[in-house]
Image (cartoon, rainbow, N blue to C red):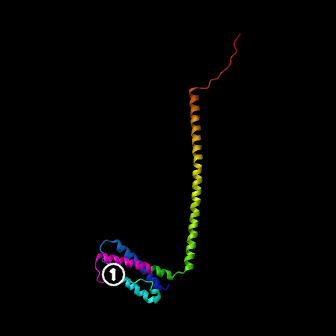
Amino acid sequence: MKPELYSCLKMLEAFRKDIISALDVRGGFPAAYEFSDQYSKIRRLLKRNLNSEQMKFIPTVYGLYGESSIQSRGAKLQELASAANMAIAYLQSLDRDLQKEIDEKEQEIKRKEKEIESIKKIYTEALEAIGQLPEVQRSKAVAEWKKHHREIEENSRKKYPPVIFTTTKKKE
């Protein structure tokens, strides 16, 4: 892409952002005239750097001359935003070819496949951990039971000391 076209692309991207922010403001769109003039200037720059066949893909937006209602200015801003989007898409396509886009898509698919594999691995490990949870709970319960049994045995020994039986012989 020629540097001049790249500059126009960047100007259109900034232009689009400004229009979108102007559309978000509720004040009657006072800058609609200025936006219309800016788009015309960018379009003239493009006309110097593109041939007539290429210029067919850059939308023409006519000015606001004679229109003063808020609705017409808002509609004009929307039309300018749409035109800027189309011009940006076209200029970006000049720097690309189909094979380059296919290669990028393939790389993106491979990256997403790696992400999916990573997520699958995490899920598998999580499922294994969840599968071991009942065993862990059972082990804790058994440990608690053993602890209680030991306490019962110790308490029993304290209350009832062991009795030692001895056998004595009777005297005859």
Residue shown at 47% from the left, 81% from the top: 90
On the image, the x and y values in percent for residue 70 come to 29, 75
Q: What's the amino acid at mark 1?
A: Glu
On the image, the x and y values in percent for residue 130 come to 57, 51
Residue 143 position by quadrant = top right
Q: Against 116, is 92 above or below?
A: below
User: Would residue 63 appear left or right of 135 to someone viewing this image?
Assistant: left
On the image, the x and y values in percent for residue 171 come to 70, 11
In the structure shown, which secondary structural element does the residue marked by tag 1 occupy? helix
> Viewer-proximal residue, 25 or 99?
99
Residue shown at 59% from the left, 63% from the top: 117
Task: Report the residue that reaches farthest toward the top.
Answer: 172
Q: Determine which residue is flagged by label 1.
A: 34
Q: Against 55, is 78 above or below?
A: above
User: Would residue 22 appear left or right of 104 to someone viewing this image?
Assistant: left
Please state the extent of the stretch shown in magenta in the rendering.
64-87
